[in-house]
Image (tube, rainbow, N blue to C red):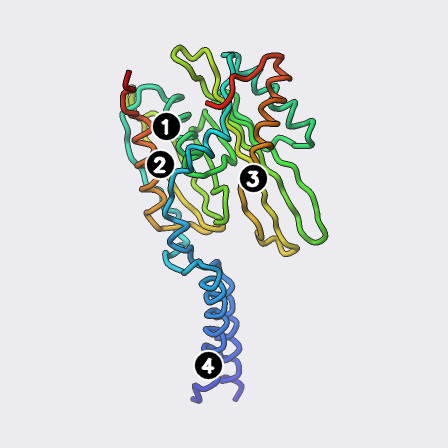
Amino acid sequence: MNAAPFVAGCALALALGGAARADSAAAGSPPAAETTPASLAVARDFPAPDLLHAQRVAIATLQDLGFALESADAERGVLIASLLDTHPLRLAVSITAKDDTTISASVTTDWAGASLASPEPVAAFFSAYEAALNPPPELD
Amino acid sequence: MHQPRLLSFASIAASLLLGCAALPPPPAALALAPISPDERAQQTRLYETDDRAALLGACIAVLRRHGFAAEDQDAELGVIVAAKDATDGRERTRLRASIAAAPAGEFGLETSLRLTLQRLAWNARGRETKREAVREASEYAGFFDEVARELGAPGAGPE
């Protein structure tokens, strides 16, 4: 079997794909992390006796990280927010009560509508959220 | 006889589909960083009221007056998301306002109102072509002042 047409087809498509990536790099955005089709939720527990307060802190944390709220639902504990600027990164945060003194925070991310496996945004959210839930005492 | 040609078409089609898939995100986009204190102050106004329902009602009245339609609301969390859509040639644009009101002050007798404004645009094929924060200070100050007038009480100023 002559494999030349197959190779030519792959080469053409790779060239087209490469052109798109080159445009991205030229615009100052080198490609890096991967998108995956799987929906990946990362969860962490935090000590917080007041669920509504914990949800409000999550909203403020998202805003402090440069996100704009798209929707919020206190009953289901779900907040959806996307980056204000430039990039189509969206976080869906779920804040629910685990018991009387603990809440469970679960985060999924997507990039332009595709689930994202990269851990950086989730880690950044959890780090900022933990700090916001436990602010240092104010000095007199 | 036609197998190589079919194989070629199939490989081109499959690869083009892969090529059209969303590009992977640049690392800078995933390294989230806090916004500046100035930007946060610009987005925030403290009101001397604990009547958050009245404050959210005033926000909705001001947004409606400026042509926004509510997309999402949650009274318990004090959240309003509203948008104003327009079509400019083949481009569809949206100005989105996201508002969150939260208790503030030592005894929760004040309310902190936080507003973010965002411009979005999509081309004729539905592909997002613009995503940017509105940073003009006057847009935020104007909104907060109008909300204060709607309430009949002045806002205390930036948080």
Front position in the image: B108 or B146:
B146
From mark 4 to mark 2, how far is it between C-alphas? 45 Å
The x, y position of residue A43, in whole percent, is 31, 37
Sequence-earlier tag: 1 or 2: 1
Residue that numbered label 4 is attached to: A6
From mark 3 to mark 2, how far is it between C-alphas? 29 Å
In the image, which disc is placed on residue A96?
Answer: 1
* Label 1: few (<14), some (14–19) or many (≥20) C-alpha neighbours in 10 Å: many
Q: Amino acid at mark 2?
A: Ser
Q: Amino acid at mark 1?
A: Thr
Callout 3 and callout 2 share a chain: no
Residue that numbered label 3 is attached to: B134
The x, y position of residue A39, in whole percent, is 39, 47
Give left or right: position of A49 versus B139: left
Q: How many marks?
A: 4
Residue that numbered label 2 is attached to: A106
The residue shown at (50%, 41%) is: A84
Q: Determine contact: label 4, label 1, CB under 8 Å.
A: no
